[in-house]
Image: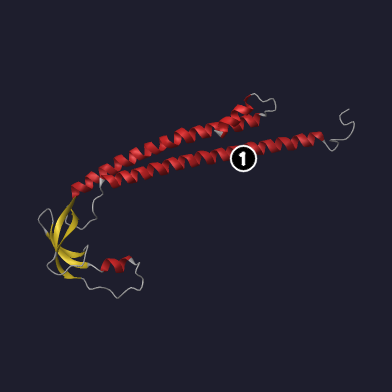
Amino acid sequence: MRAMTGFWLWRRNPLRRPTDLLESWVALLAALFIAVGGPAAGLAVASLVQDSLVQSVRAQNEHRHLVAATVVRPVKQPPVDPDPETSSARDALHRVVATWTAPDGSVNTRPVGAPRAVTPGDRFRLWIDDHGRPVNRPMDESTAGSHAALAGIGAGALSAGLVEGARRLTVWRILQRRYASWDRAWERAGQDWGRTGTGS
């Protein structure tokens, strides 16, 4: 709005300098790019990320399987860590050796992280891949949508920031040209500027 107002005020102003009109055009174009280009870039990126993540979700759901694992024995815990925020100490609380059957029928026995305190013989659910290796839980579509939305917002904000940065750089160059023009005008006026009879 400010850019449009400035452009309208300078449009027929007799005191308008070429740099004033140029600065107003730059501000107007930047405002239009931010208002239109930013959301368009955000939607485009969000759509691309959404498509990519949906394919990833489908692939994960196809190749990751939820099986029942049986606890064989607990894993010996490391010495108490004084830092409760340390992830290794937190994960080691429920580290156990468990056994499970992979989709291909092979039996796997290895240390894994149990979601709760368990004892030998207890069963818990475990995500594995096609080869029987433990993996993270597959991403769901709602999480994919959230990631896509965040990516779109970030892309829109980044494009708006780039346009604003370009506008500021352009205005700075215009101001430098304006100041240089003023300096040349003062040099032409000479040191007699303001004296009686100057120019007569």
Q: Height in image: 170 above or below 121? A: above
Q: Quadrant of the N terminus?
A: top right
Is 45 on the left or on the right of 127, as rendered? right
* 17 is higher (above) or lower (below) than 97: above
Q: How was this image coloured?
A: secondary structure
Residue at (24, 51) in percent of width and height: 138
Quarter where residue 167 is shown: top right
x and y percentages locating residue 83 in the rendered image? 36, 71
Residue 51 percent location from the top left of the image: 29, 39
Identify whether 144 is placed above or below 198.
below
* Outermost residue, top side: 12
Residue 86 relative to residue 77: left or right: right
Q: Residue at x 42, y 44 (%)?
A: 154
Quadrant containing the C terminus is top right
Q: Nearer the viewer, residue 168 or 13?
A: 13
The mark tally for this picture is: 1
74 on left or right of 85: left
Q: Position of residue 118 (x, y in %)?
A: 18, 67
Which residue is denoted by mark 1 in the rendering? 172
At x 65%, y 38%, the residue is 175
SS category of the residue bearing label 1: helix
User: Going 19% across and 70% down the picture, which residue do you hit?
Assistant: 74
Instruction: Please tell me whether residue 132 is drawn above or below residue 146 in the rendered image.
Output: below
Could you tell me the amino acid type at mark 1?
A: Trp
Looking at the image, the residue that sits furthest to the bottom is 79
Is 101 on the left or on the right of 113, as rendered?
left
Q: Nearer the viewer, residue 57 or 188?
A: 57
Residue 34 in the image, given as x and y percentages of width and height = 48, 36
Q: Nearer the viewer, residue 132 or 149?
A: 149
Crowdedness near tag 1: few (<14), some (14–19) or many (≥20) residues, C-alpha within 10 Å: few
Which image quadrant for residue 44?
top left
